[in-house]
Amino acid sequence: LGPDAPPLVVAGTGPLAPLLRDRPGVHPVGFLSHDELIELYALADRCAVPSRDEPWGVWVNEALACGCPVVASDAVGAAVDLVRDGEDGWIVPAGDVAAIAAALSAPRPGGDVSRGPVAGWTYDFGVEQFLEAVELALG
C-alpha cells in the first residue's frame, strides 16, 4: 500500500501473527475481547477478511453492524450474503493481492453500511433461523 498508507491494525493471535511483528506500518494488537473488537470496528476505516477458505466469517457481520466497510475475499461465505460490492465494501478474488490492495486503498463507500443487508440479521432473525433448523432436523 506504500509508505503513506494509514497504519494497519491487526487483531488476533493466529498462526500468522508472528509474521507481523516489527513490520513497518503494522500494529498487531493481539487478542481482543468482544467489546474491544466492537470499539475497533467502530474506529476502523475498513475491516479486511481476505481469507482463502472461510465458510462464514462472523467478522463480516460484526464489522458491518458497527458501520465499518469490509474488504472480503470471495472465499468468505458471509461476504456473498452481506456485502454489496462497492456499497458496503468490496469482494475480491481470494489470493489476489493486487485486488486486496486496491480495495484497501479505494475511497471509503458513502452511506451507512449498517443499513445494508446486515440490518436484517437481528437477534430475532437468528432465533427464527435456529427454530427453523431445529424443526427441519426433527422433521
Image: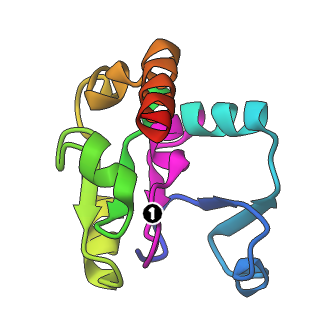
Residue at 33%, 20% (x, y): give it.
120
Q: Residue furthest top?
A: 124
How busy is the neighbourhood of tag 1: few (under 14 within 10 Å), some, or many (20 plus)? few
Q: Which residue is mark 1?
A: 55
Q: Secondary structure at mark 1?
A: loop
x then y, percent, for residue 26: 65, 70
- With respect to residue 31, does 63 lie above or below? above
Residue at 25%, 52% (x, y): give it.
80
Toward which corner of the image does residue 110 lie, by quadrant? top left
> How many numbered markers are drawn?
1
In the rendered structure, the answer to whether residue 139 lies left or right of residue 27 reads left
Residue at 62%, 70% (x, y): give it.
25
x then y, percent, for residue 106: 25, 56
Residue type at tag 1: Pro
Q: Is residue 108 visible?
A: no
Q: Is residue 47 magenta?
A: yes
x then y, percent, for residue 46: 44, 47
Quarter of the figure with the C terminus: top left
The residue stretch that appears in magenta:
43-63
18 or 6: which is nearer to us?
Answer: 18
Residue at 42%, 19% (x, y): give it.
125
In the rendered structure, the answer to whether residue 27 lies left or right of residue 92 reads right
